[in-house]
Image (spheres, rainbow, N blue to C red):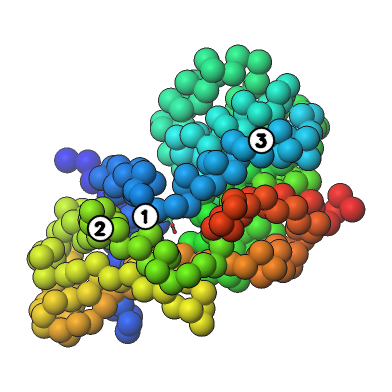
C-alpha cells in the first residue's frame, strides 16, 4: 500500500515530543478532519476573527478598493477555499488578475475553476506552493504591480521574528508594492480565551484531532480521553497558547518510540499572537512595509491593514 504520510510529519512529531516542554507544530492540525473542524470554528459565536474580518472587508470594500486601485495583480498566499478573496474581487471592479496560491494543487484548481465562473473577466492564475518556504510567481507576462492579500490573521500563528521574515520574503519574492493583511488585535482576556475554548468544544476537538492524526498516520497509541484541551492568554507575550494536557502519568508509543508524560504535563500545540496596531505596524516596518492604513470594526477586535512597500516610496 502507498504510504501517503508526509515524511516530515513523523520527523517533526518525534522531535517535538522529545523536547522539554513538549511541542507539536500547528501546521499539522489541517488534515481533512482538522480542516473541517477549523471551518466549524470559524462559524462559532465565540470565534470573532473570521466574521469581524469579513464584515470589515464588506463594509469598507469601496474604500479599500480605491486605496488599492484596479490596475493591480492580487496575490493571495495560502488561499485555501478562496472565500475571503471573493469579497475583495467583488469590490475591486475591473481587477485584471488574481493569483491564489496554496500548498494543495488539487484543492486550489477546484476552487479557482469555481471562481472563474463567478468572475469571468478576471484572469485567475493559481500557483501551487508552500508560502512558508517560497512564493512562486506564475509564468505570465504582466508587469502590473502586485498586491499581496494575506487575510485570516494567519500571521498571528508565526513567532514575531518569523512573521517579520515572512513579510519581508513576500515583498522580495513577488516584488509586491502593497500588502493587505488581516491581524487579530489585543483585547480583554475573557473574549480571547473564549474564542479558543468554546462552549461547544469544537476547538478542543480540533486540538485533540492532532493526536488522532498521529495515532492513524504514525502507528501511535494516544488514549484521547487521557488528554484535555487547554487554552490560555499569555499576556506578557501577547499570545493565546493552546496545549494538550495529560490527565495522568502515562506513556505513549509512536512509530516504536516511547514517550513518558507526567500527570498534568502539557504539549504546546499553537500560539496565536495578538497585536496592538502600533506593534504590528512596527513589525511590518522592519520587513519593509510602510505607511500603514488601518480599517477596524467598532469594537476594535480585528484590524485590516494596507501597507506600501518601502521600495515604492
Ligand atoms: C488559522 N489561525 C489564524 C487560527 C487562529 O485563530 O490562530 C487557528 C485557530 N486555532 C484555534 N482556533 C483557531
Q: Are marks 1 and 2 in contact (CB under 8 Å)?
A: yes
Residue 181 horizontal/vertical position (percent): 63, 50
Q: Are marks 2 and 3 in contact (CB under 8 Å)?
A: no
Question: Which quadrant would residue 300 be assigned to in this image?
Answer: bottom right
Kindly report the distance in space between the C-alpha atoms of the residues bearing marks 1 and 2. 8 Å
Q: Is mark 3 within 8 Å of ligand 1?
A: no
Q: Residue 227's mark?
A: none
As displayed, is residue 221 above or below residue 150? below
> Could you tell which of marks 1 and 3 lies nearer the N-terminus?
1
Q: Residue 46's mark?
A: 1
Q: Residues within 10 Å of mark 3 (few under 14, many from 20)?
A: some
Q: Residue 199's mark?
A: 2
Residue 102 horizontal/vertical position (percent): 50, 40
Looking at the rendered structure, the secondary structure element under dot 2 is loop
Q: Residue at x 60, y 71 (%)?
A: 161
Q: Residues within 10 Å of mark 2 (few under 14, many from 20)?
A: few
Kindly report the distance in space between the C-alpha atoms of the residues bearing marks 1 and 3. 25 Å
User: Disc count in the image?
Assistant: 3
Amino acid at each position: 500500500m502507498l504510504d501517503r504520510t508526509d515524511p516530515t510529519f513523523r520527523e517533526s512529531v518525534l522531535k517535538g515530543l522529545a523536547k522539554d516542554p513538549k511541542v507539536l507544530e500547528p501546521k499539522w492540525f489541517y488534515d481533512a478532519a482538522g480542516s473541517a473542524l477549523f471551518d466549524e470554528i470559524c462559524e462559532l459565536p465565540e470565534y470573532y476573527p473570521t466574521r469581524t474580518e469579513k464584515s470589515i472587508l464588506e463594509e469598507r470594500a469601496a474604500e479599500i478598493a480605491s486605496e488599492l486601485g484596479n490596475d493591480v495583480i492580487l496575490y493571495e498566499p495560502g488561499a485555501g477555499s478562496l472565500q475571503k478573496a471573493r469579497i475583495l474581487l467583488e469590490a475591486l471592479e475591473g481587477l485584471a488578475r488574481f493569483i491564489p496560491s496554496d500548498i494543495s494543487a488539487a484543492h486550489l484548481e477546484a476552487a479557482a475553476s469555481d471562481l472563474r465562473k463567478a468572475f469571468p473577466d478576471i484572469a485567475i492564475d493559481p500557483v501551487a506552493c508552500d508560502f512558508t518556504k517560497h512564493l512562486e510567481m506564475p509564468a505570465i507576462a504582466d508587469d502590473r504591480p502586485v498586491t499581496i492579500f494575506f487575510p485570516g490573521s494567519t500571521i498571528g500563528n508565526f513567532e514575531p521574528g518569523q512573521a517579520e521574515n515572512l513579510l519581508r520574503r513576500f515583498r522580495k519574492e513577488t516584488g509586491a508594492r502593497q500588502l493587505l493583511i488581516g491581524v487579530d488585535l489585543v483585547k480583554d482576556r475573557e473574549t480571547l480565551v473564549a474564542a479558543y475554548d468554546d462552549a461547544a468544544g469544537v476547538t478542543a476537538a480540533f486540538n485533540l484531532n492532532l493526536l488522532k492524526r498521529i495515532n492513524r498516520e504514525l502507528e501511535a497509541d494516544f488514549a484521547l480521553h487521557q488528554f484535555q484541551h487547554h487554552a490560555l492568554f499569555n499576556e506578557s507575550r501577547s499570545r493565546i497558547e493552546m496545549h494538550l494536557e495529560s490527565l495522568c502519568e502515562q506513556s505513549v508509543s509512536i512509530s516504536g518510540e516511547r514517550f513518558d508524560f507526567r500527570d498534568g504535563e502539557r504539549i504546546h500545540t499553537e500560539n496565536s499572537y495578538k497585536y496592538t496596531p502600533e506593534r504590528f505596524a512596527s513589525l511590518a516596518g522592519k520587513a519593509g512595509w510602510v505607511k500603514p492604513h488601518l480599517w477596524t470594526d467598532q469594537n476594535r477586535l480585528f484590524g485590516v491593514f494596507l501597507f506600501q512597500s518601502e521600495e515604492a516610496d
